[in-house]
């Protein structure tokens, strides 16, 4: 009987190092977004709506990697702050399609610049070419996995 291979030394595990990079990026994003009174999920929502106006709650949740319930809270908070609008009643079906307000677009620009600066700092040890290769190699891993189009969380 063949013994299954174990993860072994965590410092040699690509997945473990990826998780460390994710945690470092998340912490850096939290720090630059906090003065704008934004969370990372709120920023992700603004960024997605800035690129794709009119996305539904379900689609935003899927693309931001949060549950529909969590995204509903994110949307409600952003709407209360006047950063986005949603109709009171769905024009058809049940989806309340969200769009950024002018204040939302202004906040998104500020937040996007701050997040990009944090990302640049984190990846500064790598050359532009190394960053490009890393991005392409990680994208090929995602494309080969079932996470490429993740199912909606319950």
Image (cartoon, grey):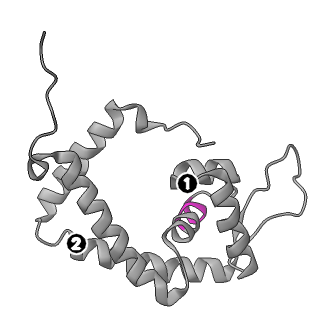
Q: Is residue 152 above or below residue 37?
A: above
Cα separation, mark 1 vs mark 2, equals 24 Å
Q: Vertical placement of 17 versus 25: above or below?
A: above
- Residue 57, x across and y down, in percent: 69, 54
Residue depicted at 29% across the width and 71% down the height: 119
Of labels 1 and 2, earlier in sequence is: 1
Who's the residue at 75% across and 79% down the image? 80
- Residue 123 image point, x, y percent: 19, 68
Assess whether mark 2 and mark 1 are in contact (beta carbons under 8 angstroms).
Answer: no
Give SS at disc 1. loop
In magenta, the rendered stretch is 47-51
In the image, 69 versus 109, the foreground residue is: 69
Q: Residue 36 carries which label?
A: none
Magenta residues, dominant SS class:
helix
Residue pictured at 61% horizontal, 62% vertical = 49
Which residue appears at 35% of the width and 35% of the height? Answer: 143
Can residue 53 be spotted in the picture? no
Which residue matches tag 1? 66
Crowdedness of circle 2 by 10 Å Cα count: few (<14), some, many (20+)? some
Residue 48 inside the magenta-drawn segment: yes
Picture coordinates of residue 146, whole percent (x, y): 41, 31
Residue 46 in view, yes or no:
yes
Residue 97 lies, with reference to residue 94, above or below; the image says below
* Percent of width and height locating residue 26: 37, 68
Packing grade of label 1 (10 A; few <14, some 14-19, many >=20) is: some
Q: Residue reaching furthest top?
A: 1
Give the label, 1 or 2, closer to the camera.
1
Q: In this view, does 119 lie to the left or right of 71?
A: left
Residue 122 is marked as 2
Q: How many labels does the image show?
A: 2
Q: Is residue 40 found left or right of 24 in the rendered image?
A: right
């Amino acid at each position: 009987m063949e013994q299954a291979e174990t993860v072994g030394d965590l410092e040699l595990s690509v997945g473990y190092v990826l998780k460390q990079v994710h945690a470092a990026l998340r912490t850096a994003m939290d720090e630059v977004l906090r003065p704008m009174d934004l969370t990372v999920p709120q920023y992700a929502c603004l960024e997605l709506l800035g690129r794709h106006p009119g996305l539904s709650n379900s689609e935003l949740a899927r693309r931001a990697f949060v549950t529909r319930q969590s995204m509903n809270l994110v949307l409600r908070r952003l709407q209360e702050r006047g950063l986005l609008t949603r109709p009171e009643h769905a024009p058809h079906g049940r989806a309340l399609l969200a769009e950024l307000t002018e204040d939302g677009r202004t906040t998104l620009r500020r937040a996007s610049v701050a997040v990009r600066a944090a990302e640049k700092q984190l990846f500064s040890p790598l050359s532009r070419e190394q960053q490009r290769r890393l991005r392409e190699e990680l994208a090929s891993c995602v494309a080969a996995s079932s996470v490429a189009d993740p199912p909606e969380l319950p």
